[in-house]
Image (tube, helix red, strand yellow):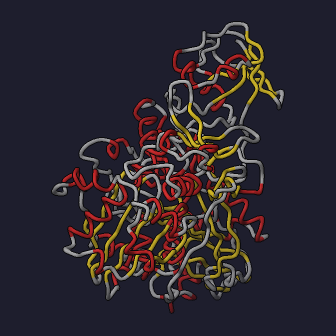
């Protein structure tokens, strides 16, 4: 069997001859950026072949996506390499620290958790008092009403005289069950976790359920990135791997959650055996993949998910390692593209209680929008695409160290803000939006989205020194020359233009469907990982949101995790969130009258005065 040596670690792995190189590396848990899931279209999965006994020739796709100097130095796209013998590969990427949003606005609410603990005393039976231990437990819990005692609690407990703590869970029907018995009085030790599973990032917070205080948090990039960076690519992976695709995607996210649980428990110096409940907000696809439910139906017409209702199960059912009998609560969705993360956000922002016209928007790969007309909720989802998260951009990357996150263009040059104050290696979503806003503002790009031709600039114009034209006559803006040249191409501008057209048209379509005008809006609430890093100047300067809402913007942070936190701490919140989801209407943009014309109108960038 041939082997592959991976540099710079020097580790050697065996593989099946003829296997795809990207799959070989991913199977070993080796990080290779592959946004398109090995389809050969993103050009991101670069590796350098240092030595190879037998390897396929460079493909036509690689000739298009790789520079001549890269090809000369042995750089290949791993998804297009099939090897038949021993080879040595050098990795060209490394995992970087990512900028992940973990906090958000939280309204006041009453604590009413469905996990409670009570200390009890077990005495040793005697000839005079032969009360069974199960009956002793029931007698001491009698003030709580009927408490079911499952057989597994009795079979796993080692009963001796002394103090114990009963851990009790109350389900949605009000039925109480004994989850476990702990030695000693641990009644004041109750922990839970609020989790937000995004397509790109995952955030876990450890919460003291006796006080509601968030103690520590952990965040990471969603490990399902190995199977594609967006939901449709991951759904395609399920389709193309019918035997184990669903299981692999589930394992990836469950392992991530277990790793973060280890992290938060170590930070707080507690045992994970004291974590009794987890509450999860996620989009509909991520929720399916977490629970191991087939998500393929979400990716094809009529886009009907397998389930949207809330789920309350034992965490151990899907392999999450916490206390015995611990519960996993998954918040409800509305439809395939209005998931539990958006329902959580609508609840946190109290849209169902609003006495004004409020618009809530979560900007990402999909732009989910909810409009509250004095508490009546109408929602839609628009396919913004991955450009606003740095993907499908020639120099794009996720929001990690080395990513340009802000750009200012002046007559004296280009000013860059880089995550981690490092040398720039690419541009993330907030950066691409900032630079396009600056290109529009400074007249590099016309309202129709095209770069101005160089001969249209006045002689000696400072902008001429920031532009370049390649051999094919294609114009591009030069962000920086060091440490390597990073460009914004015409194609990059078009990607942002399509994203902004999708979001703005959804915004207008929803307002019109509700019979309102832009002037009647009282508030616009911006949520999510991406939205939190976007100032009004970028949102409005590019035209994602109209000028009329500039003074009405409110940033609410990670409302998905906040909603999960509130559900963790209150069974009343759980029921109210489920009720809200049930009464949220959804409109399909494609079926909206004149939507195509509206979308075309919304493609134009704001006219600079």
State left or right for residue 575 relative to residue 157: left
Residue 582 at least partly seen: yes
**Residue at (50%, 85%) from the top-left corner?**
107
Residue 605 position (above or below residue 369): above
Tell me the residue at 62%/44% (across/down).
466
Query: Which residue occupies the foreground of this view, 122 or 332?
Result: 332
Estimate the x, y position of residue 465 in percent, counting from the top left: 64, 43
Q: Is residue 167 shown above or below 75?
A: below
Query: What percent of the width, then of the height, locates residue 309?
Result: 34, 63
Would you identify the image quadrant in which residue 321 lies?
A: bottom right
**How many labels, in total?**
0
Q: Is residue 41 left or right of residue 51?
A: left
Q: Quadrant of residue 372?
A: bottom left
The answer to which of 322 and 225 lies nearer the viewer is: 225
Check the image and report above or below for 378 versus 337. below
Q: Residue at x 56, y 29 (%)?
A: 470
- Residue 420 position within the rendered picture, expressed as x and y whole percent measured from the top left: 75, 57
Camera-side residue of 301 and 495: 495
The residue lying furthest to the bottom in this view is 143
| Left-right relation of 181 to 344 | right
Q: Position of residue 156 (x, y in %)?
A: 63, 63
The image quadrant where one finds the C terminus is: bottom left
Residue located at (34% from left, 85% from top): 354
């Amino acid at each position: 069997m041939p082997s592959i040596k991976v540099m710079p670690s020097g580790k050697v792995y065996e593989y099946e001859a003829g296997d795809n190189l990207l799959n070989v590396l991913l199977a070993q848990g080796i990080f290779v950026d592959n946004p398109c899931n090995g389809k050969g279209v993103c050009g991101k999965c670069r590796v350098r072949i240092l030595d190879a006994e037998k390897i396929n020739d460079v493909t036509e796709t690689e000739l298009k996506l790789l520079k001549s100097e890269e090809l000369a130095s042995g750089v290949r796209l791993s998804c297009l390499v099939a090897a038949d013998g021993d080879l040595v590969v050098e990795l060209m990427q490394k995992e970087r620290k990512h900028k992940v949003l973990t906090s958000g606005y939280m309204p006041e609410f009453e604590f009413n958790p469905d996990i409670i603990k009570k200390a009890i005393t077990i005495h040793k039976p005697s000839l005079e008092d032969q009360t069974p231990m199960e009956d002793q437990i029931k007698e001491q819990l009698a003030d709580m009403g009927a408490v079911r005692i499952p057989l597994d609690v009795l079979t796993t407990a080692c009963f001796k005289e002394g103090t114990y703590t009963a851990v009790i869970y109350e389900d949605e029907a009000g039925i109480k069950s004994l989850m476990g018995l702990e030695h000693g009085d641990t009644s004041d030790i109750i922990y839970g976790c609020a989790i937000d599973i995004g397509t790109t990032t995952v955030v876990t917070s450890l919460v003291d359920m006796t006080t509601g205080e968030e103690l520590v948090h952990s965040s990471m990039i969603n490990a399902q990135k190995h199977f594609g960076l967006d939901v449709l690519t991951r759904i395609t992976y399920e389709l193309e791997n019918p035997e184990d695709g669903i299981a692999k995607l589930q394992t990836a996210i469950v392992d991530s959650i277990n790793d973060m649980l280890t992290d938060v428990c170590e930070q707080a110096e507690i045992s994970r055996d004291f974590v009794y409940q987890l509450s999860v907000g996620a989009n509909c696809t991520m929720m399916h993949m977490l629970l191991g439910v087939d998500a393929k139906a979400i990716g094809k017409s009529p886009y009907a998910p397998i389930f949207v209702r809330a789920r309350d199960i034992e965490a151990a059912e899907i392999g999450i390692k916490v206390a015995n009998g611990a519960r996993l609560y998954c918040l409800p969705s509305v439809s395939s593209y209005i998931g539990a993360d958006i329902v959580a956000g609508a609840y946190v922002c109290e849209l169902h209680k609003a006495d004004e016209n409020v618009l809530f928007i979560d900007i990402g790969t999909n732009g989910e929008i909810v409009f509250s007309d004095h508490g009546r909720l109408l929602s839609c989802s628009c396919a913004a695409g991955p450009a606003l998260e740095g993907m499908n951009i020639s120099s794009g990357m996720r929001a990690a160290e080395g990513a340009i996150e802000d750009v200012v263009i002046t007559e004296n040059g280009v000013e860059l803000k880089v995550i981690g104050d490092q040398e720039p290696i690419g541009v993330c979503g907030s950066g691409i939006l900032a630079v396009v806003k600056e290109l529009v503002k400074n007249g590099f790009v016309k309202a129709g989205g095209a770069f101005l031709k160089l001969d249209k600039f006045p002689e000696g114009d400072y902008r001429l020194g920031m532009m370049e034209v390649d051999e094919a006559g294609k114009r591009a803006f030069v962000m920086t020359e060091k440490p390597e040249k990073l460009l914004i191409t015409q194609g990059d501008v078009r990607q942002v233009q399509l994203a902004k057209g999708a979001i703005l048209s959804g915004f207008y379509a929803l307002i019109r469907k509700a019979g309102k005008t832009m002037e009647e809006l009282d508030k616009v609430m911006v949520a999510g990982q991406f939205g939190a890093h976007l100032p009004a100047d970028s949102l409005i300067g590019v035209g994602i949101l109209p000028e009329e809402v500039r003074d009405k913007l409110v940033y609410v942070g990670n409302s998905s995790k906040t909603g999960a936190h509130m559900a963790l701490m209150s069974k009343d919140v759980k029921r109210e969130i489920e009720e809200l989801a049930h009464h949220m209407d959804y409109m399909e943009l494609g079926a909206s009258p004149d939507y195509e014309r509206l979308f075309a109108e919304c493609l134009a960038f704001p006219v600079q005065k």
